[in-house]
Every structure is written in structure tokens, then in C-alpha cells.
Amino acid sequence: MRRAMTTLFASAVSAVLLVGCAAPGDLDGDLTDDWAALPPATAFTPAAGVCQAADFAEVITLASYQPIDCAGPHRVETVHVGAFPAEQAAAPANGSTELRGAFAECDSRASGYVGDDWRAGRLRLSVALPSGPGWAAGSRWFRCDLTELTTVEAAATVVVRSGSLRDALKVASGLRLGCQQTRGGAGAGVRTLVPVECGTQHDAEFVGVWRAPDKPYPAKDADWVPLYDGCRSVLGRYVGVPNDVHLRFRSGVVVRPPGAGRWRVGDRGVRCYLWLSDRTVTASLRGVGPAGLPVRTK
């Protein structure tokens, strides 16, 4: 009898233990097969309308991407983020049709962002691309970045600014190009242009941008002729005088095309300036007409 009760007690304890080890509901106690699958990794894409404290970089990695509010000090402002086709296998090479297309989109978006052609200000537009590993992971974006410069002449340095560039060229601003004083070189030409107030004596003025055709970068004297002719047409519209054979006797012209490297990526915007080689003025010549820019007789 004692042996039978002992056996019965052991059976009951075993039953309780078995019940206690069973998982409730549909759980089976296997912790490796009930977790939901993680979503697939997505490619990193930067945001537009933010700024970077660091200098512009042609290649952006996730580790180097540190966006900040544009109200604080910064060197770069992203005005647009575009995309290459998803099926594009490799990042576009410098000078490629794809990269020129990206620059053209950035060009249009940047001008819309600031409220005028961005070249009308002390600005530089650059295009940044994903890193090699980023491209391999599926990133196909290109980033359109604007930077304020101390000058659009040679030896420009980056300005650490505070405040967004959005609509910055819609109004009069120290950022806009305007009246200039020329500094001569070894010959009789213009070596540099120095911004001055239009109310002070000056002999030059920014008149606008001429879009050069998609041709090789000018290498010889004949290649420069279309740039001068194009800038004269811009000058005539700005001042309000006919673009005829007499225009060259009214004013000289200074042309400032982008550098050869920027030309390769698609920048065809030429900055144009009128130049009074024989006199100075103390006001803007915008819209003054033939009386304000008379034909020189000597």
C-alpha cells in the first residue's frame, strides 16, 4: 500500500511539473522562431533645407553627415536632393552626361531657392555624391550644396554664416554682386574686381549671367569671342542700350566664366560685368539707356 501511494504521488508531481513547463497559448518555449523578421536595411539619403558646419565634401558618408539648423554658424547649406535612376550601376564619373544632368537640376533648384540666379551673389554651387559603400548599398542621391564666399574672384574663401540662404537674393543684400572697382594687371586689361558701394566712384558693374553653349572650355583667343559677345548682349539689356556695332564703343566688358573643372561638371554660367575704361561713375547704370552710357568718341 505504501509503495502504491509513493508511486501515485510521484506520478502527480511529474504531471504538475509537465504542466508548469508547458508554454501558454501558442508559445512552444522555443525563443528562436517566434520573433518577427527585421525590415530590410534602407539606403541613407540626406535631407534638404539643412546645413553643415563642416566644409563641402564631394563624397558624403553616413558617419560624416551631421546636419544642423541653418540659424547657427555653418559653411554649407543643402538646397535640394535629387536622385539618379535606381538601375544606374555605378556612380557617375566627372564630366559624364549623368553628372552634368545632376548639376543642371541643382542649378535650377538653387536659383529657385535663393530667388535669383545664384551666380548673382557671392555663392558657389557644388554637387555631392554618396560614398562607394553607400552606392553599393543602394544610395542613388545627389546633394546640391550652396556656400557663401568672400569673393567670386580668385583666392575666394568660405564664409561661416548664420541664417538660411532661402530667398536671400530676392532683396537687396550685401550678398548680391553689384558695383565694382577694377584693378589692372601687367597689361591694359582687368585683373580683379573689388566690390564697392554704387554711390562711390567705380568703373565696373555686374550686369548678369550669360549661359554658354555646351562646348569645350575656351582654350584659345577665338574660343573667347562667343563669351564676350554673349556678355555684351546681357550688358545691353541691363543698361537699356541696343546690342549693335556701337555697343563696344559705349562700354568694355569683363567676362568671368567658371573654372575648367566646374565646366566639366556642367557649369556654363558666365558672370558678366560692364567696364568703363575711360571714366568712373557714382551710381548704378541699370536702365540708364543711351544717354547714361553714351558712345565714346575717343
Image (tube, helix red, strand yellow):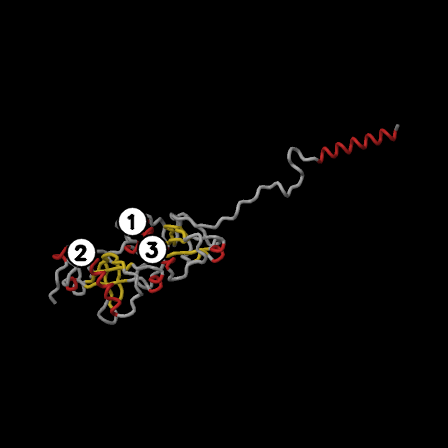
**Rendered image quadrant of residue 257:** bottom left
Q: Is residue 262 left or right of residue 289?
A: right
Q: Amino acid at mark 1?
A: Gly
- Mark 3 or mark 2: which comes first in sequence? 3
Residue 269 in view (yes/no): yes
Residue 43 drawn at (x, y percent): 48, 50
Q: Earlier in the sequence, mark 1 or mark 2?
A: 1
Disc number for residue 204: none
Q: Is residue 283 visible?
A: no
In the picture of the structure, the residue carrying the numbered disc 3 is: 104
Labels 1, 3: front one: 3
Q: Amino acid at mark 3?
A: Ala
Callout 3 crowding tier (Cα within 10 Å): few <14, some 14–19, many ≥20: some
Q: What separation in Å lies between label 1 and label 2 (alpha carbons)?
A: 22 Å
Q: Earlier in the sequence, mark 1 or mark 3?
A: 3
Disc 1 designates what residue? 115
Residue drawn at (11%, 65%), measured in percent from left and top?
Answer: 297
- Front-most of 293 and 230? 230
Q: Of the residues tagged 3 and 2, which is closer to the observer?
A: 3
User: What residue sits 36% from the left and 54% below the top?
Assistant: 146
- In the picture of the structure, the residue carrying the numbered disc 2 is 239
Residue 35 in the image: above or below residue 135: above
Q: Amino acid at mark 2?
A: Val
Callout 2 crowding tier (Cα within 10 Å): few <14, some 14–19, many ≥20: some
SS assignment at label 1: loop
Measured as percent of width and height from the top left, residue 217 is found at 31, 65
* Image spot of residue 67 (x, y percent): 43, 50
- For label 2, the SS is helix
**Helix, strand or loop for disc 3:** helix
The total number of labels drawn is 3
